[in-house]
Image: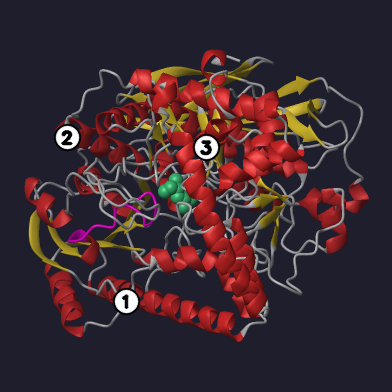
Amino acid sequence: MKHQDILSKMTLEEKAAFLSGKGEWETRDFERLGIPSIFCSDGPHGIRKQAGAGDHLGLNASFPATCFPTAATIANSWDTALGEELGKTLGEEAMAEGVNVLLGPGLNIKRSPLCGRNFEYFSEDPYLAGKMAASYVRGIQSKGVYACPKHFAVNSQELRRMAMNAVVDERTLREIYLTGFEIAVKEGGAKTIMSAYNEVNGTYANENKHLLKEILRDEWGFNGIVITDWGASNDHALGVAAGSNLEMPNPGLDSARELIEAVGSGKISMDDVDARVDELLDAVMTLHANAKNRKEQFDHNAHHAVARKASAESTILLKNEDGILPLKRGAKVAVIGDFAFVPRYQGAGSSLVNPTRVETISEMIKGYDLQVVGMSRGYARNGKEDAATRKEALDLAQRADIVLFFFGLNEDSESEGMDRTHMRIPQNQIELLQELGQANPNLVGIISAGSAIEMPWHHYFKALLHCYLNGQAGAGAALDILTGRVNPSGKLSETIPRRLEDTPVYRYYPSRERTSEYREGPYVGYRYYDTAQIPVLYPFGFGLSYTTFEYSELTASEAGISFTIKNTGTRDGAEVAQVYVALPDGKVFRPAKELKGFAKVFLKAGESQKVVIPFDDKTFRYYNVKTNRWEVEGGTYSIMVGASSADIRLTAQVKKAGTTETLPYEKEQLPAYYTGKIENVGDKEFEALLGRPIPDGKWSGLLTKNDAMCQMYYAKSGLARFAYNRLTAMKKKADESGTPDLNTLFIYNMPFRAMAKMTNGAVSMEMVEGIVNIVNGHFFKGIGTVIGGFFRNSKKNKAYENGLRK
Ligand code: BGC
């Protein structure tokens, strides 16, 4: 053990207490042993260090920090150098605020556009997500702060996120849901990782030996600490045995007692406890030392400038007819849309940043050479009709040469804690844009939305700029692009399908049962659309520029490829070249093409550059479920270089020898997977893919401590059903108000056990058992346990606390 000196002085009580948090954000300190406390904070796109009362839902105020564009936005830059720069900036702010562990980046895969947290995640593609995440991690950690990639793993649904079992076959798990984390760990060198709320194949992520021990620690060589998501610990002892170090946030001493008992009963070994304590000690001591002479300030202006640059580089030009953009000098424009006055620049939930300042279009536009005929909010943010404002907007549209329409998803459309139920923007915005389109043919749309939306109205626009959620400096960045000060270079990190019904998981997502079955296998995003040949509106990897690029001279060898890109237009610009790999005649099913490399190349007008992209261990591999290893199938691979997944410019072939003769699948059993038509996979075929029976996900009988509050719908007790109805009514009211109530959403999706995990010792697991008994109709038995448990818990807590103080 690295810290044997300290370990040997620690009592079991101290070790057990050390492995869970002492408050919303901090670890326990032990003066006697010289162990300091370390501080964790969200979040992925800005520091959310709370000054006063802590909460993990972004409810209480936090110190002002730079609000950078969210991960969904930055991924569109495809620029790992930018990711690293952002990471450094975030690391610097974290250090200035006294934050030791930054709880991000988030890199769950966008399995469905409906996931309420997609705005916090990078991509539908694990390679891109992993590369971007690794770049953040490198940047953050270069400043002495640890990054914490999250949520490990398969956390792609918000509905009952804490009480959900993701049922996924091993190959899909590895290729789609783990590869990004693998890159963040191996290439980024992440020193902490956050275990997800959900179960993965029947075992909670935080106590999943396969994930945490066999894959994360043994295969990937991770030697840092695993931190639970807030309230994600189910059985702390099993977590520790599986390789999880720190239960967060504040389970009081109940979890520590659970550990001591588990050691006593032989459920876990003392060696496991010592190993986890040693790893945590290493993190705590290192982080504390790193922060010794920290700078307590950061340069607000310089960081704002980084946010602006990041936003400009990540904005995507989706459409540009008649060269309407960039706007000519002095162009006569009308500015319409509430978002031009109150920007939608970040998402809701634990990632919510209190920005140092926020730019708005209505203010910033004064700094540009444009003739603004007027500005109008046009529509009401809450979706309500507002005839007067609408008329004002239409009048303006008629007086201008070009209409700039700012619109998108409202705050209540996407948030942590909920999934969307559709992909539409609010109806009042659609109606206004249709009328604007009739009033003025020169309509330019500027979209703010953290995830893919349906755009059946896109033909109304001559140009469309997708800004995603572009952070506090987003307005200036958008204007820079609209006016041509910056040439757009963002490309989509997710597909924009034509309609929700076209998405691969339309029938599977979000699961309403106890289990979420990943029946689509690896066919996520473009992997599906390409293979099943489903037309999309804007393909993965797509984005326009004000200049043009030509690709030539592709050469390929077993080691990698090289090709030339030339800027053939009249403006300087940047191109994101993408490398896709396919094995057309393979015996093992696989998507029509998969991203295996990319490069962002900045070129002056007329300039050309040779681009070299080496292959890596991921280029040809697939996970073979028979040999239980990564293998390469022998054959002639197509290497495609393109400007998007649908715009392949150059192709070459590379021959590879196979690594095994053992084939993982019987083709006849898996027709859907061999064609990519996975929209409606039957039980038998999904079982063949899983290699085991599908677990029964139906609710029946009694509720358990692991069922979410919203399952009280099934409760035997009238009281519990009443509580369920109240909760549902509160949720509905909040939904209708236009602002999601994150507390209600959290409680709605929270399992009973979380009461013991997040109340700083006030509620014990024993009391939770009592509550569950009440819910199941055993009122007297239950209330007895709750009351008795309360006194027993307080007494034990006191005794433990006194012991620790000695
Ligand atoms: C979220 C995490 C976040 C944590 C702390 C949880 O609810 O899932 O992403 O880091 O809260 O705020």
The residue shown at (41%, 65%) is: 743
Query: How far apart are labels 2 and 1 at the CA level?
Result: 35 Å
**Residue 46 colored in magenta in the image:** no
For disc 2, does the CB lie below 8 Å from ligand 1?
Answer: no
The circle on residue 569 is none
User: Where does the N terminus fall, quadrant-wise?
Assistant: top right
> Residue at left 31%, top 44%?
48
SS at mark 3 in the image = helix
- Disc 3 from disc 2: Cα separation: 38 Å
Residue 183, percent from left and from top: 57, 28
- Along the viewing direction, whichever of 129 and 574 lies nearer the viewer: 129
Residue 610 place in picture, x, y as percent? 46, 16
The answer to whether residue 343 is magenta is yes
Q: Which residue is mark 2?
A: 300
Which is the main secondary structure of the residues drawn in magenta?
A: loop
Nearest-to-viewer mark from 1 and 3:
3
Judge left or right: residue 508 versus residue 497: right
The residue to which callout 1 is attached is 383
Q: What residue is pinned by disc 3?
A: 17
Magenta part of the protein: which range? 340-351
Decide which of 482, 451 is in the foreground and name it.
451
Mark before the other along the chain sequence, 1 or 3: 3
Quadrant housing residue 586: top right
Residue at x 73%, y 71% (from the top left corner):
699
Q: Earlier in the sequence, mark 2 or mark 1?
A: 2
